[in-house]
Image (tube, helix red, strand yellow):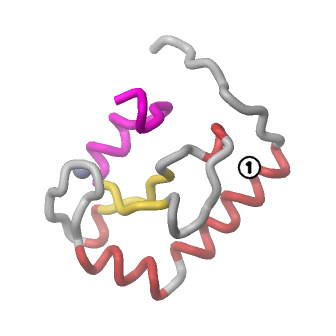
Amino acid sequence: MEPTPFLVEVSDAEMRQERQKARELRASQWWKRKLAGGVCHHCAGKFAPAQLTMDHLVPVVRGGKSTKGNVVPCCKACNSERKHKLPFEE
Ligand SMILES: [Zn+2]
């Protein structure tokens, strides 16, 4: 895979902080309700909650935040396809 250019500089400390916030969001009732809906944000397929992962619309390494507006349920196939992509690159 071609290396993709970084748009922003994100420090290790900031990445750790956002990943910690993502863990907290994953434990929230809000996220559990999202998973219970069972719909992948990207392909709109129906999945069991255990098959869905948390996807950052703007990845943490690109300066994305672990907020409700930036995380969506995503199936494993879409997640691996989307790695290192931003929405406008699709
Ligand atoms: Zn999907």
Judge from the rendering whether residue 73 lies leftward or rightward of residue 30; answer left or right. left
The residue depicted at 54 percent of the width and 45 percent of the height is: 58
Instruction: Examine the residues drawn in magenta and state their main secondary structure.
Output: helix
Q: Please state the horizontal and vertical placement of residue 22, each as a whole percent of the image.
A: 60, 65
Q: Residue furthest front?
A: 88
Q: Please state the horizontal and vertical placement of residue 33, each as a whole percent of the image.
A: 35, 83
Q: Residue furthest left?
A: 46
Indicate yes or no whether the magenta region holds residue 28.
no
Placement of 57 over or under 46, stated as above or below: above
Quickly name the residue at label 1: 15
The residue depicted at 36 percent of the width and 38 percent of the height is: 80
Within 10 angstroms of label 1, few (less than 14), some, or many (20 or more) residues? Answer: some
The residue depicted at 39 percent of the width and 59 percent of the height is: 53
Placement of 15 over or under 31, stated as above or below: above
Placement of 21 over or under 13, stated as above or below: below
Count the numbered circles shown.
1
Q: Please state the horizontal and vertical placement of residue 65, each as a whole percent of the image.
A: 64, 56
Judge from the rendering whether residue 21 lies leftward or rightward of residue 75; answer left or right. right
The residue depicted at 28 percent of the width and 80 percent of the height is: 36
Which quadrant of the figure has residue 1? top left
For the C terminus, the image quarter is top left
Label 1 SS: helix
Residue type marked 1: Met
Q: In this picture, which residue range is highlighted in magenta?
A: 75-90
Which quadrant of the figure has residue 82? top left
